[in-house]
Amino acid sequence: MESAFFIEKGVLILAVFAITMLIALYSTFAERKIAAFFQDRVGPNRAGPGGFLQPLADGVKMFTKEDFTPDTPNKFLFILGPGLFMTTALVTSAVIPWGDTISLFGREIRLQIADINVALLFVFGVVSIGVYGIMIGGWASNNKYSLLGAVRASSQMISYEIAMGLSIIAVLMMTGTLSLREISIQQHGFIDWNSHWLSWNVFKQPLAFLIFLICAFAETNRTPFDLPECESELIGGYHTEYSSMKLGFYLFAEYINMFISSAIISVLFFGGFNYPGMNLVNETLGTNIMALLGVVALFGKIFFFIFFYMWVRWTLPRFRYDQLMNLGWKVLIPLAIANIVVTGAVILLWK
Amino acid sequence: MATNIKNISLSGRKKDVSNKDMTFMERIYLPAIAKGMGITLRHFFKPKVTIHYPEQKREFSPVFRGRHILMRDENGAERCTACGLCALSCPAEAITMTSAERKKGEENLYREEKYASVYEINMLRCIFCGLCEEACPKEAIFLTEDLVAPDYQREGFIYGKDKLVMPLEDKPVNIK
C-alpha cells in the first residue's frame, strides 16, 4: 500500500515536472514563431524540420556561454537568485489538479500531486516568494542598475499580488473552499442544470477573472507589464549581470510561470478539467476516458492562454511606470473590493 | 471668410486636435485593446512575404548587373582581345589585364591575334556599373545575373580568368 502510494506520486511528480519543462521549452519556440506570424514573418525554421529543434539549439547555446560572475561579495546569493526563481515557478505545479480521478491497477489515482485544502493560499505564498528570486538576484549582482531593476520588479509584483488576492476572494466566497480540486469539481460540465446557468466561474465572476488575468500578466512580467525587463529601455533590469544558464534560468522561469499561471486561470475560471458533454462521455465511454479527455481539455485551455499571453505581448505596448502603479492601486484594487462587496450582497440576497 | 492658412488642408485629411476628455468607454481601454488584438490576429493568418533565401531566390530585374563573365564565341575561343577599353572605362579601376600574342595553333583558344593572358577584376572595388560591358568593342565582357560569392579573405575577391571566363561547355551555339 505504502510503496504503491510512493510510486504513484513519484510517477506523477516526474510526469508533471517533465511536461512543465517540455512546455516551457517549447513555449520559447512558440513565442518566436507566434511573434513572427503576428509580424508577417515565418520565424525560426532552420534547426530541424520546421525549426522544431530550435529550443535545443538555444539550450546548447545558453549552456556553452561564458558563465560570468561579477565581483560581488554575495557569490552564494548570486547563484541562489535564479535557483529560487526557478524553484518557486516549478513548485506551484504540485497543487494543480491536472485531471479527474482515474482507476488503474485497481487503484483510484487522482491526477494531482498534492490535494491540500489550502491550495490557493499555497499558490499565493509560493508566488510571493518568487519576488525573492528577483530581489536577491538584483541585490547580489553588486550593480546599482540591477538593484534598481529588482526594486522596480518587486514593487510591481507586490502591488499586483494584492489586487490578485482580492479578486480571488470574490470567487472564494462563491466556492467556499480553497482547494483547487474542489473548485474544479464545482464547475462540473459546462451548464449547471440546478441553477440553469453556465457552470464555469468565468461566467459567474467575469470581473474577478478580468482582474485576475491582468494581475497574472503583471506577476509573470509579461507585456504590457514587462517593466522589470524592458529589453528596449533598461539594460536588462535585474538580470543585467547574469549570463549563461543563470540567465537562462531567469528567462526559462518566466515561461514556466506563464504555463503555471495559465493552468491556474484555467482551473479557477475555465472549469479546469471540465468540458461540455462530459456526463455523456462518462456514460458511454467510461470514467477513465472521461478523465483523460479532461486532461486534454485542461491542456487545451492552458495552451490557449499561453497563446493569449503571446498574442497580448505582440499587440500591446508597455505601460509607463506611473501608469502601472495607477492601474494597480487606483483601478484594480478598488474594482476588486467593489466586486467583493457586490458578490457578498448577491450571495446574501440569494439566501 | 477669406481663405485663412488655418482652413487649408493640402492633403484633405486635416484633423483638428482637441484636448477633450476621454469618454468612459475610451478610458477603460478594453475595447481598444480588443480592436488592436483583432488587427494583430488578422496579421497572424496573412500570407507571409518572406522569401526563403537558399531555396527560393528573389527574381532579379532583367537589367540586373552581377558578376562578370568573359565570353567565348561559337568555336569556344575567347573573344577578348585585351584592348584595355574596359579597364579604361572602369570608374572604380577594378580591372587589370596583361596582353599576350596568340601563338600558332592557338586559334581555337583565342579569337583575335592578341589576347589577355591575365585578366583580373577586383570584386571589392567593382561597383557593377556595367561601363566595361558598354565599352567592350568585341562583346567579350558581360555582367550576369549571378551574385559574387562571399569569402573570408580579400584575396578571394580578385577574380582571375579561372573564375571569369565562361566554361567551355556553355559556349554559345551558332544560330544560322
Image: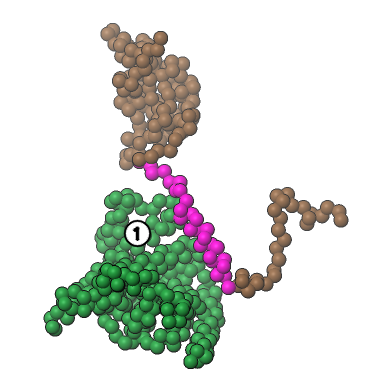
Q: Is residue B68 above or below residue A325?
A: above
Can residue A34 be spotted in the picture? yes
Residue at 35% across, 40% down: B55
Mark 1 lies on residue: A29
Name the one closer to the observer, B45 or B165.
Answer: B45
Disc 1 marks a residue whose amino acid type is Phe
Residue at 29% across, 76% down: A100
| Label 1 chain ID | A
The part of the chain drawn in magenta is B28-54
Colour displayed for chain B in the image of the structure:
brown
Q: Is residue A349 above or below residue B44?
A: below
Relative horizontal placement of residue A93, taking residue B44 as reference (left or right): left
The answer to which quarter of the image holds residue A201 is: bottom left
Locate residue B74, reporting x and y percent: 36, 13
Residue at 21% across, 79% down: A108
Relative horizontal placement of residue A289, taking residue B17 as reference (left or right): left
Helix, strand or loop at label 1? It is: helix
Whether the magenta-drawn stretch holds residue B47 is answered as yes
Colour displayed for chain A in the image of the structure:
green
Count of marks placed on residues: 1
Name the one closer to the observer, B40 or A148.
Answer: B40
Name the one closer to the observer, B53 or B74.
Answer: B53
